[in-house]
Image (cartoon, coloured by chain):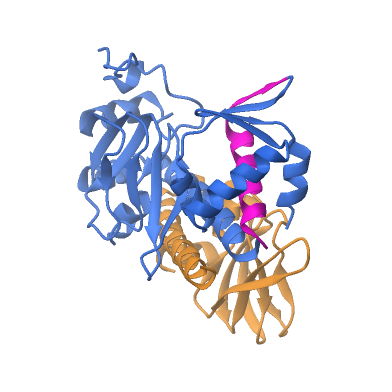
Amino acid sequence: VGALKSVFDRGESGFCPAGSILFLEGQPPEGVYLLCEGQLELSIRSSKGAKLVLQVIGSGRILGLSAAVSGRPYEATARALTPCRFSFIKRDEFLRLLSQDPQICLQVAKLMSSELRSAYECAQRLRSYRA
Amino acid sequence: MKLPRGSNLIENCLKCSLRGENFFCDLPDEALRSLEAIKFTSVYPKGAFLFMEGQSPRGIFIICNGQVKLSTSSSEGKLIIIEIAEPGEVLGLSAVLSGMPYEVTAETISSCQVNFIRRDDFLNFLSEYGEVALRVAQQLSRSYHIAYEQIRSLGLSPSARSKLAKLMLDWCDRSGEHTDRGHKLKLILTHEEIAQMIGTSRETVTRLLGEFKSEGLIEVKGSNLLIRNKAALEKMASF
């Protein structure tokens, strides 16, 4: 998490039981989450109801970064697989910190680079499965 | 300077007439002056490789004009076109920031003017101009969104037919013009490349285009594509 630790030090702590939804695909971005404990699944769904789980993520991961930066809706749904403890920072506050501190901005860009890499890997896997 | 195909070479970023609002290089003058000092301007013909997947990141490439195909390969060697990058986009950002190999291959599909900035120069530029880092994050977020569009199409679309319909609708959103007879577009991709965008075979794309034509959904004349029945494509693409 590095430089973003200072961001989440200002966040609100939260807890959710297994099965709860942290955010939904298509929902406007409320903020950014740091998963402190537990496991979550990220999935997408077709309009006809078909669900595709893209990945299971564990503690230390940050969620909702891209949506918070762009203002676009969340790309996927995050659902808790186990009880989860997290830190949450509202989008407005997050963007304010970003505009004030270039180091945080750079850290966010680096994290997004690694998320983009995972998204490309996911596309590669899907191309293999559905050939 | 005039290029062979009639377009102009923009040598000075400060006087650039191509730069639009959403361009990465739409930066304050001071930052732009620094960028000017570290960039190398080149013009590439169609079919040139700017960088290859797996190669160590040498630097970033800003597209001034022209279009660039970004592709990656599955473990079986099947090519997937992730995106057709447009002017104003920066290529190679995530690899340069992370220091990991380029995760895609970038190949020009038209003649392109590109500004190249070496990795070390770009990282120094970023630490000097903090506001550019936010622009970088926004660019990455855009690429992330496009990658998710691909994931949705590859993972959830029920058929190649619906994927092709969705792709054509995306083209309508991004380019072309609306006429009395429908939406008019320039077809810049080959059937093989369309197949690589939607994860199917070249033969399937050729067959589907034939079906779309005989059903009166589209008309194709050379590289001109006319979308005659957008509503039918929308119905087909809803998955």
Q: Would you say residue B168 sits in the magenta stretch?
A: yes
- Look at 34% across and 16% down and name the residue there: B7
Left or right position of B98 against B173: left
User: Which residue is at the front of the view, B82 or A130?
Assistant: A130
**Chain A, which colour?**
orange
Span highlighted in magenta in the image? B158-179
Q: Can residue B210 be seen in the rendering of this structure?
A: yes
Q: x, y (%) of residue B172? A: 63, 34
Q: Is residue B35 above or below residue B137?
A: above
User: Which residue is at the front of the view, A78 or A43?
Assistant: A43
Q: x, y (%) of residue A99? A: 50, 45
Q: Which picture quadrant has residue B101?
A: bottom left
**Chain B, which colour?**
blue
Q: Which picture quadrant has residue A9?
A: bottom right
Q: Is residue A118 above or below residue A57?
A: above
- Look at 36% across and 44% down and name the residue there: B91
Q: Main secondary structure of the magenta part?
A: helix
Q: Which picture quadrant has residue B215?
A: top right
Q: Can residue A95 be seen in the rendering of this structure?
A: no
Left or right position of B33 against B164: left
Left or right position of A17 against A70: right
Q: x, y (%) of residue A129? A: 52, 73
- Look at 42% across and 40% down and name the residue there: B131
